[in-house]
Amino acid sequence: MKTITSIKELKELLAEARAAGKSIGLVPTMGALHEGHASLVRRSVSENDVTVVSIFLNPTQFNDKKDLERYPRTLEADCSLLEKYGAQIAFAPSVAEIYPEPDTRHFSYPPTDSVMEGARRPGHFNGVCQIVSKLFSYVEPDRAYFGEKDFQQIAVIRRLVADLGFKLQVVPCPVIREQDGLAMSSRNTLLTPDERAIAPQIYAALSASRDFARSHSVTETIQYVTARIDAVPGLCVEYFSIVDADTLADVRTWDAAPAIVGCITVYCGSKPIRLIDHIHY
Ligand code: PAF
């Protein structure tokens, strides 16, 4: 596996691969890799001749400086894992390489980027679109792999791809969970043992809500999930929205859209750590 920090070198290497007729898969990450990322990389390796994994802690998508400061940084371990997963290229540029000048582009894809996380983390999806559009133009992948754990992010990226006319397939990959149901996330390493012990209650409530939803309205289901999680000391629901899986607009009835998903963000512990998850109905 090659580890590259320069955009020029990355482009040269990929131009050679493309000229040789090779297909290219891209897995964008911010590092602190875990089994969730492994599943994306393995999928890309099985579907493409060359897999590029970017490791870049993108400052423009952090609206909260403290969140950026405490984000785990594990570059050496990440590169060893990528080698093991079979990736051909790790692209780990510096902030100056990606943003020699401030990126002043503004992306707006409402309602996908204005609801839920978009409403609570101003500028977050704009920063995601800035970095993802740059990566797409450097790598020009045939396929780009994203974890469904960040369900809203995929909806926004689909709009970005359509808007800018990128010729690539967005491949959503299923959430990978710990044995107790907690969705894998780089942020989980920031949880204390006590916080880690209560965090699985989030997915337990979401799973139970599927049965509950069969005989209750959307509003009642929102109340059920919120009350059940808020009853756990140390957990506090920031929002739980039941939305159209494509547009992410709120739905009022179960027949309002072909696919409906419940998206949640919960504060865990006293720091607190924000944990996100979702469930399909
Ligand atoms: O999902 C992530 O880790 C990030 O938002 C992404 C897509 C790598 C962009 O920085």
Image: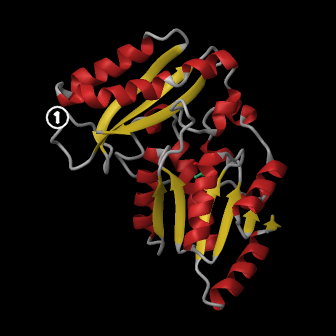
- The image quarter containing residue 189 is top right
Comparing 208 with 245, the one in front is 208
Horizontal and vertical percent for residue 231?
A: 43, 9
Residue drawn 81% across the image and 55% down it: 80
Q: Which residue is mark 1?
A: 253
Where residue 74 appears, as percent x and y from the top left, is 79, 44
Q: Is residue 53 left or right of residue 77?
A: left
Say whether mark 1 is within 8 Å of ligand 1. no
Res. 94 visible in picture: no
In the image, residue 103 above or below residue 206? below
Asked if residue 152 can be seen in this view, the reply is yes
The residue drawn where x is 57% and y is 36% is 178
Q: Residues within 10 Å of mark 1 (few under 14, many from 20)?
A: few
In the depicted structure, whether residue 31 falls above or below residue 52: above
| SS assignment at label 1 | loop
Q: Is residue 36 above or below residue 193?
A: below
In the rendered image, residue 52, in percent from the top left (x then y), is placed at 67, 67
* Type of the residue with mark 1: Thr
Of 35 and 95, nearer the camera is 35
Q: Quadrant of the C terminus?
A: top left
Furthest residue to the front?
179
Q: Would residue 80 appear left or right of 161 to someone viewing this image?
A: right
Residue situated in front as seen by the camera: 116 or 206? 206
